[in-house]
Amino acid sequence: MTINTTPKKKMPTEEANSTAGDTINDREFSTEYEALRAAYAMRGHTLRRTDPADGPVTYWAERWGLVRHLPTLHDVGMFLSRIGGRV
């Protein structure tokens, strides 16, 4: 297995929107969030989050106009299992 060490060129809008830099933890967090969004979509729900630039990130799930606030990723996972989904 080879690993590409060439840095990815960022688009100008990505550079303007980046906050704490591109770290492993930021990428892992984003990957986990995207996997959860896909799992929610499979169950007919929409998962969204607040903008990290605005402060602490919180989440909400929506279906049929009903919204459930989910303060942490742990709560997101717990609600996903409650609605019969899994990652």
Image (tube, grey):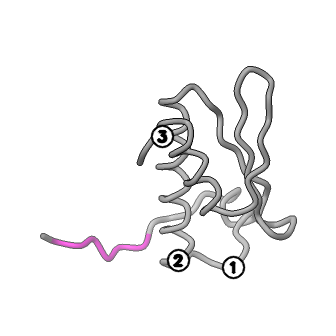
Q: Amino acid at mark 2?
A: Asn
Position of residue 11 measured from the top left corner of the image (x, y, whole percent):
61, 57
Q: Position of residue 61 (x, y in %)?
A: 70, 40
Secondary element under disc 3, as helix, strand or loop, is helix
Estimate the spatial distance between the alpha carbons at disc 1 and disc 3, rounded to whole Å. 27 Å
Give the label on residue 20, or none: 1
Chief SS of the magenta region: loop
Q: Which of the two labelled residues, at mark 2 and mark 1, occupies the earlier sequence position?
A: 1
Give the answer, above or below, for where 81 lies relative to 9.
Answer: above
For this orientation, the residue located farthest to the top is 64
Q: Label 1: state its secondary structure.
A: loop
Q: Are marks 3 and 2 in contact (CB under 8 Å)?
A: no
Numbered disc total: 3
Q: Which residue is mark 2?
A: 25
Residue type at mark 3? Ala
Residue 19 location (% of width, % of height): 73, 73
Residue under the point 12% across and 70% down: 1
The span from disc 3 to disc 2 (Cα, nearest Å) is 21 Å
Name the mark on residue 39: 3
Tell me the residue at 65%/34% (across/down): 46
* Crowd band around label 1 with a 10 angstrom C-alpha radius: few (<14), some (14–19), many (20+): few
**Three-letter amino acid code at the position of disc 1:** Ala
| Of pointers 3 and 2, the one earlier in the residue sequence | 2
Q: Nearer the viewer, residue 38 or 27?
A: 38
- Give, as a single range, the part of the protein colored magenta: 2-7
Rendered residue at 63%/78% (across/down): 21
- Secondary structure type for disc 2: helix
Whole-number angstrom distance, CA of label 2 to CA of label 1? 11 Å
41 w.r.t. 73: above or below: above
Q: Position of residue 41 (x, y in %)?
A: 54, 32
